[in-house]
Amino acid sequence: MHIPYDRILETITEKTAMEREQLEQRIEAKLKQLSGLISREGAAHIVANELGVKLVDQVSGKLKIGNILGGMRDVETEGKVLRVFETRTFQSERGGGQVASFVIGDESGSVRVVLWNDQAVRIKELAPGMAARIVGGYTRDRNEQVEVHLNDRSKLIINPEGAQVDARPLYERKKIRDLTEHDQQAEILATIYQVYEPRFFETCPQCGRRVRQQDAGFQCETHGAVQPEYSYVINLFLDDGSGTMRLVCFREQALRILGKAHEEFLSYRTAPESFDQVKNDLVGQIVKVVGRITRNELFDRLEMVAQLVYPNPDPKEELERLERMQ
Ligand SMILES: [Zn+2]
């Protein structure tokens, strides 16, 4: 089961009197002690065990959405349908198939539910606001987000009897000035006023995680020596009249904001001067962004990590929305 590092730290500090800094020192010491034999996450698990902290209360059965983690089996959960996505078809070595997904939420959080093949047709029965119960799902980590997947033996029950359908809204539109560290997700509408050169980094072609340079090659913590691929991040500054904020756009969102394809973006690595024009075109553009707010410790300021960028928001829709907000 995969528990994100930050979540391990949170659980330990919640269940013990330990300060985060003190805890991180202890994990650091454990890492050194086991020099290179273990990941940071692994060291955190060992420290939790030494402190007698149980990181997960429950690994299957009926769970609140906020307690669902990657790598669980036989998960039962229910919530309110918040978003429904289009069905996609795909080709794989074993032939074609289809996949559909939707998002459910309860008062503890939200999660994407993925339906494969025969289950995917049921997406047509779903609409936002309905209640949905999942029985016998399994979970996966994708891009640091947990998803609940349904196989042939899993059940999707729509509007089950006695379902509670209260859910936190997915996110709110906010002014930059009003954003806080507690905004797990928020939406802003702002103008780009500064763009930095993209930064490139090597990733594992199998798991997409960052790899480390070692000797002559690159090393993935999970997959060993690999021929790396490149991923990238682009930073920009936004202004919405109430304040300014740095926006961090990784790969997919960097491509969305620029309207470029992956191959074209990679060309800026070897020919950075060709990025100048792109930069000029971006400055002054209005964007709508849904993202997570984090604190940049180095500069002691809040920034947004983009989760979904809309490069050309519809002005009519935005005006109507503004009127509704007032
Ligand atoms: Zn890997």
Image (tube, rainbow, N blue to C red):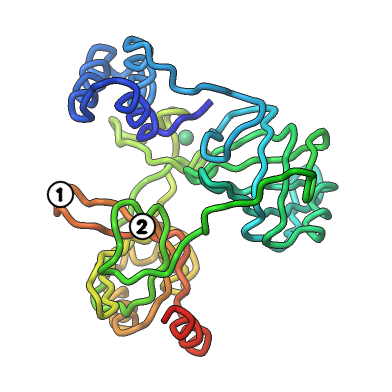
Q: Which residue is mark 1?
A: 298
In the image as oriented, which residue stretches furthest toward the left? 299
Tell me if mark 1 has few (under 14), some (14-19) or many (20+) residues whose alpha carbon lies within 10 angstroms of its own: few
Q: Are marks 2 and 1 in contact (CB under 8 Å)?
A: no
Q: Secondary structure at mark 1?
A: loop
Q: Which residue is mark 2?
A: 305
Q: As rendered, which of 253 and 14 lies closer to the eye?
A: 14
Quadrant location of the C terminus in the rendered image:
bottom left
Tell me if mark 2 has few (under 14), some (14-19) or many (20+) residues whose alpha carbon lies within 10 angstroms of its own: some
| Amino acid type for the residue under numbered disc 2 | Val
- What count of labels does the image hold? 2
| Amino acid type for the residue under numbered disc 1 | Leu
Residue in view at x 38 percent, y 16 percent: 53
Disc 2: residue Cβ within 8 A of ligand 1's nearest atom: no
Residue in view at x 42 percent, y 30 percent: 225
Residue in view at x 38 percent, y 55 percent: 292
Q: Position of residue 299 (x, y in %)?
A: 14, 54
Q: Residue 40, relative to residue 281: is it above or below?
A: above
Q: Residue 141, relative to residue 309: is it above or below?
A: above
Q: Is residue 112 left or right of residue 93?
A: left
Q: Is residue 71 left or right of residue 233?
A: right
Q: Residue 40, relative to residue 290: is it above or below?
A: above
Q: Secondary structure at mark 2?
A: strand
Q: As rendered, which of 168 and 25 lies closer to the eye?
A: 168
Q: Residue 286, relative to residue 83: is it above or below?
A: below
Q: Is residue 108 left or right of residue 196?
A: right
Does residue 275 appear anywhere in the picture?
A: yes
Q: Position of residue 285 (x, y in %)?
A: 35, 83
Q: As rendered, which of 59 and 308 lies closer to the eye?
A: 59
